[in-house]
Image (tube, grey):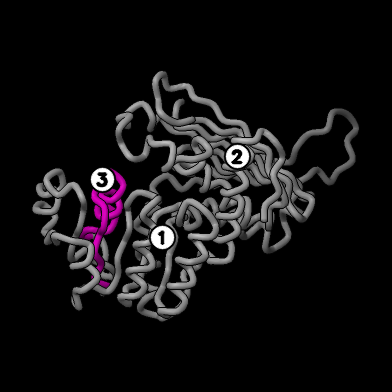
Amino acid sequence: MVRAAIVGLGRWGRSLVNAVHGKTDAIRFTAAYTRTRASAEDFCREKGIPMLARFEDVLASRDIDAVVLATPHSRHAEQVMAAAAAGKHIHVEKPLTLDRPSAEAAVAAARRAGIVLAVGFNRRFHPCVVEVRNRLHDGRLGEVMSIVGQHTTSTAQFVPFDNWRAQPDEAPGGAITAVGVHSIDHMIEFAGKVRDVLVSTGRYIKGGPSDDTTNIMLRFESGATGLLFCSVATATTFSLSVFGTKGLAEISRPNLQHFRFVPVSTVAPTGPVTAPPDEIVEHPTFDMLNAELIEFARCIEAKRPYPVAIDEVLHGMAVFDAVVKSAKSGQVERVD
């Protein structure tokens, strides 16, 4: 069993603890640290998780194998590097950092230490995402032509303006840090490296300190194109449509539960062109947080890399940098 410390106990940190608490023998949270100790004491008492006074105490403990970081994005780089230097395996929430250079420094530290570094792209584990992946690998989708994504939540309605998540330096590029990076991660996996982006952002929560909505046009090195709308200021939904030369694969619903595959028509029409019957798959109860943390533990035990490829994570950070730059310039920006 992997003994882990949760670092950061806001809404998301508690969600990570709840995802595995009492549900698996693979990983267990045996310690906790948060800057806002008073607000987390009841939660930790209920879960039986001892609280430590300092992050340094987490790193110094020989009874902790791994740290799970659910902390402000701007602190990820220093915390990953410190944890790696202490020999702790690391699960860090997305985005890895807030720019490519700091992400490279964090990854280099993890590689030097020989530890498992997992970035929290939990949606990669969902069975509906696996359905898309399988149809790409076996050729049923053909060559990817375009990917269209929507990812929205009502989060900004409930986040106080003085909360770190609402601050411009923690949320550059609008909704990209909160939700958009997930869809960009899927696009990179399915269509390869991004060549350039064109971005516009907007602010729809009155009085909000940051842009909350982002539209992105992407062009890939393969010749494929992409469109992404993401927002934290409207109703919650998710959809990802992958258009291939042999079919369409689509994931939808806020919990990703609905998968649809439609092959291209192969019979010459005698009238209007009609689509073959849909193939529908439903996965309504899959727990993505549980899946990612158990896989993290299994990778530690088996001494193998986490299945979210670090090279793809780093390319995603380069896309992130280009998105932020384009949001400011209003111009097409190349991905370096």
Q: CA distance from mark 2 to mark 3?
A: 28 Å
Q: Can I make out residue 236 in this image? A: no
Amino acid type indicated by mark 1:
Ala
Give me the residue at 39% from left, 51% from top.
74
Tell me the distance, in whole angstroms, between the alpha carbons under discs 2 and 1: 28 Å
**Which residue is found at the position 37% from the left and 63% from the top?**
91
The answer to whether 243 is drawn above or below residue 111 in the figure is: above
- Identify the residue at the far top of this view: 206
Query: Is label 1 in a helix, a strand or a loop?
Result: helix
What range of the chain is rendered magenta? 2-22
Is 178 or 280 nearer to us in this picture? 178
The residue pinned by badge 3 equals 10
Nearest-to-viewer mark from 2 and 1: 1
User: Does 27 sit above or below residue 159?
Assistant: below
The kind of residue tagged 2 is Gly
- In reply to whether residue 21 is colored magenta, the answer given is yes
> Is label 3 in a helix, a strand or a loop?
loop
Q: Quadrant of the N terminus?
A: bottom left
Residue at point 38%, 59% (across, down): 92
Q: Is residue 282 left or right of residue 77?
A: right
Q: Is residue 135 left or right of residue 125?
A: right
Rendered location of residue 109, percent (x, y): 44, 72
Which residue position is annotated with label 2? 149
Place of residue 57 in the rendered image (x, y in percent of width and height, measured from the top left): 18, 67
Q: Which of pointers 3 and 1 lies earlier in the amino acid sequence? A: 3
Viewer-nearest residue: 237 or 82: 82
* SS category of the residue bearing label 2: strand
**Amino acid at dot 3:** Gly
Q: Which residue is mark 1?
A: 77
Q: Residues within 10 Å of mark 1 (few under 14, many from 20)?
A: many
Q: Residue at x 39, y 20 (%)?
A: 207
